[in-house]
Image (cartoon, helix red, strand yellow):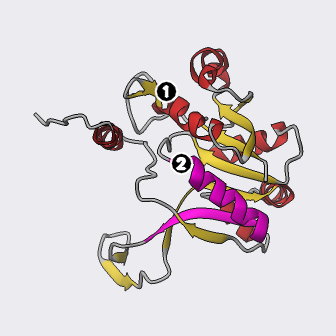
Amino acid sequence: MCAAAIIVAGGKGSRMGGAIKKQYLPLAGIPILSRTLLKFDACEAVQEIVLAAPEADMAFCRAEIISCCRKRVTLVAGGAERQESVYNGLLAVENSPRIVTVHDGVRPFITPEQITSCIREARRSGACIIATPVTDTLKRAESSGMIRETVERKNLWMAQTPQAFLYRTIRDAHEAARRDGYRGTDDAGLVERIGKQVKIIPGDPGNIKITIQAELALAEAVLAAEKGWRVTTP
């Protein structure tokens, strides 16, 4: 069941603010990106890891980020947008795996068990993502901010990563998008666009994507609670 994993960390982290890119910020003393990589390093279903990071950060990532991993991590330059970073990762996969899983570098709370479940389902169905059901009431609004309608939330899901696919399927989906000049919001959307079905398996609300300061504070609190530390507020 061995698969390749592409970890996407090519962003500038502008929403977080500050001089350090969000993926390199320390989370309980360990960079967020290193924590994410360690989950894939510990997953027996993952044979190969490719990290797409900013080209200017290659030396830093080699020295400070990937050195925590036992498995070999291939570094590739990320693109101007996430979609290009994933494609660069696909080109860098060496062992022609049957399955490729794509994951956001700033989702450090994914577990090896969840990664394995996603890969296993992708082997069965061809494509699989982890997602959580929508629990809040959804409103569709006009540009003015006035509500147009309340959207039925039944059967609606919030997509997360990892997302796993047959290698040829995700490669074809990305090449079709490049050919057509199409930009999607996730890899599953590109696969759906070429007519392939994608299976959802339930994820975990705790599998948060850390993009703003409030999410970083939440992540620190989660780790503190897991370790039994006392969290105090000013």
In the rendered structure, find residue 136 and report the number of the disc placed on it: none
- The image shows residue 43 at horizontal and vertical percentages of 65, 43
| In the foreground, 193 or 131 | 131
Where residue 76 sits, quadrant-wise, is top right
Which label lies toward us, 2 or 1? 2
Q: Which residue is depicted at the point 59% across and 47% down?
A: 112
Q: How crowded is mark 2: few (under 14 residues within 10 Å), some or many (20 or more)?
A: some
Sequence-wise, the earlier of marks 2 and 1 is: 1
Helix, strand, or loop for circle 1? helix
The residue tagged 1 is 24
Magenta stretch bounds: 110-133
> Is 166 placed left or right of 187 in the picture?
right
The amino acid on which the numbered mark 1 sits, given as a three-letter code, is Tyr
Q: Which residue is depicted at the point 62% across and 52% down?
A: 115
The residue tagged 2 is 111
Residue at the extreme left of the image, as rendered: 234
> Is 172 placed left or right of 212 in the picture?
right
Please say if 185 is above or below 231: below
Q: Answer yes or no: is residue 191 visible.
A: yes
Q: Answer yes or no: is residue 182 visible.
A: no
Q: Which residue is depicted at the point 35% across and 41% down?
A: 219
The amino acid on which the numbered mark 2 sits, given as a three-letter code, is Thr
Q: Does the magenta stretch include residue 119?
A: yes
Where residue 146 sits, quadrant-wise, is bottom left
- The image shows residue 10 at horizontal and vertical percentages of 61, 35
- The image shows residue 77 at horizontal and vertical percentages of 71, 30
